[in-house]
Image (cartoon, helix red, strand yellow):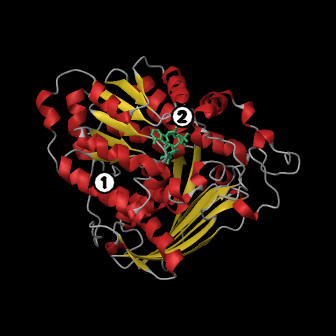
Amino acid sequence: MKQSRRHFLRSVSLLAAGTAVPLNAFAFGKKEKLKIVLVGTGIRGTSFWGRRLVDQYSDILEFVGLSDINPGRLEYARGYIGVKCPVFVDFDEMLSVTKPDLVIVTTKDSTHHEFIIKGLKAGCDVLTEKPLTIDEDKAQDIIDAEERYGKNLIVGFNYRWSPYVTKIKELLMQNSIGELRSVDFHWYLNTYHGASYFRRWHGLRQDSGTLWVHKATHHFDLLNWWIDSDPAEVFAFGDLEFYGENGSFRGDKCRTCPHKSECKFFWDITKSKRLMDLYVKNEKYDGYIRDSCLYRREINIYDKMSAQVKYENNVVLNYSLTTYSPYEGWRVAFNGTEGRIEAWLDIPYMSKMNVDQAEMHAREMEQTGKEVAEFEPVIVHKLWEDYKTVEVPIERSGHGGGDRRLQDKIFLHPDQKDPYDRAAGLRDGVMSILIGIAARKSIESGEPVQIAELTTMQPRKKRII
Ligand SMILES: NC(=O)c1ccc[n+]([C@@H]2O[C@H](COP(=O)([O-])OP(=O)(O)OC[C@H]3O[C@@H](n4cnc5c(N)ncnc54)[C@H](O)[C@@H]3O)[C@@H](O)[C@H]2O)c1
C-alpha cells in the first residue's frame, strides 16, 4: 500500500537509523504529496532519483524544484525527469522559494556536506547519495548539524538491498559459522567501469576523496553491516601505477584525441544521445568534460588499494580494490569459529555466465528491472563437514536489484520491519567513509590510524542500529 506525506515523514525518522528525533512535520501532515527538491542533476540524479521517482511514486510525491550549477544540464534534466517544477542555479533560493519536505543530494561528492547541512538547517529531511562526504572535518560538520537542527538524514546505501548480499547477512545472523573472526574482501573494477572513474571528477581527490571513499564506502558499509561492529583501526597501502601520469601518451579528451587508434581506452561518447545531451551539450557552462583523458597528469587518486581493518569486536578484515581488472566482480570469505562462508559475484571462471564486460556494466546501471532468472551460489563450509551450496536468486539491473528495493522501502513500505536492518542513516554513512579516510591517512603517514580519533562519533563493539 502506498503512503501519504505524513506517513512518509514519520518513516524518514525510522529509516534514519541511529537518530531518535521527533519530526515536527507530523503535526501538519495531511493528505498532500511529499514535496521534494533535488540538487545535482547529473546521471544519477536525473535517472534513479529523478525519472524513476516520477515513474514509480508520483501519487505520493512531487518535485517542487531542481538545482544544479549548470543551467543547461538543469533545463535538460527537467525534460528528462518529466517534471514542470522551477529550476534553480541557486540552491538557497530553491530552499526558500519551494519549502520542501525532503532534499535529495546527488551532486559530486565533495559538495554533499554543503547541501546536507543547508537542508537540515532549513528544517528539511535529507536523503543523500553515497558517500556521505569526503573527509573527517566535513563529516563532523554533518554530525553536528543533524544534532543541532533535529532533522533526519538517510544515506542511499543501495548495495545492502540486493538479494545476494542480504543472503550473506542472513547466514551470518544465523551464526552458521559460529563466531566471526576474520573477513577477506576483494573487489575488482574492470577496464570499463574502473576506467570511467578516471575520466572525470572522480579522478581528483579534492572532488571524490579518492576511490577509498567514493567507491569503497559501498564496500565498507556492507562490511560494517555484515560484521555488525564498528571499525577501530586501519592500516593501508595504495598507489597510482596505471592511469594518470603513467600513460605513455595522453590527449585532452577522447573526442579530439590524436591517439584514438592506439589507445585501448578510447571511448566514443558521441554514440550516446543521453550522454551528449546531459554532458557534452552543456560543457560550455562549466567546462565539465565527461570523456577526459584517463592519462591526464592531474589525476591524484589511487588505482590500487589494500587495507587491513581491525573492528571493535576484534574481527580482522583484509580488503583490496583493483581498478583495471579484465573482469568486474568480487569475492568475500568469512572465517568463523565453526566454519567458513565463501561468496563471489561475476568471477567469469567460477560461473556459467558469459556476458561481455561492457554489456555487464550497462546492465548494472540499467533501471527497468527486466531480468532473466539467474542463481548464484554462497558456500557454507562447516568445520569437519562437507560444504553446502546455497543457491541465491540474483538480479543484475540497478546494482543487483538493490536500487529499486531501497526506494520501495523508503517510499512504499517504510514501516515494515526489516529483519536485516538495511536502512542506513548518519552513523552508517560516517562509519563507512571513516575507513577510507583512515586508509588515506595511513598511506600518507605509514602508520595505523584510529577511527576514534577522526570525529566525535565513537566506534562501538556492536553496531548501533
Ligand atoms: N549509489 C550508487 O550506486 C551511485 C551510483 C552513481 C552515482 N552515485 C552518487 O551520485 C552522485 C552523483 O554522481 P553522478 O554520477 O550523477 O555524477 P555527475 O557528474 O553525472 O553529476 C553530478 C552533478 O552535480 C552537479 N554539481 C557539481 N557541483 C555542484 C554544486 N556545487 N552545486 C550544484 N550542483 C553541482 C554537476 O553539475 C552535475 O550535474 C555522486 O555522489 C555519486 O557518488 C551513487
C-alpha separation, residue under disc 2 versus residue under disc 1: 30 Å
Q: Amino acid at mark 1?
A: Ile
Q: Pointer 1: what residue? A: 142
> Which residue lies most toward the right here?
261
Label 1 packing within 10 angstroms: few (<14), some (14-19), many (20+): many
Tell me the quadrant of the picture where the N terminus can be found. Answer: top left
Above or below for 157 versus 366: below
Q: Amino acid at mark 2?
A: Gln
Q: Position of residue 252 (x, y in %)?
A: 75, 47
Q: Is residue 2 visible?
A: no
Q: Residue at x 20, y 53 (%)?
A: 147
Q: Is residue 152 visible?
A: yes
Label 2 packing within 10 angstroms: few (<14), some (14-19), many (20+): some
60 and 259: which one is in front? 259
450 and 320: which one is in front? 450
Above or below for 165 versus 435: above
Image quadrant in which you'd find residue 407: top left
206 and 49: which one is in front? 206
Q: Position of residue 464 (x, y in %)?
A: 26, 62
Q: Pointer 2: what residue? A: 367
Q: What label does residue 178 carry, if any?
A: none
Q: Residue at x 64, y 32 (%)?
A: 275
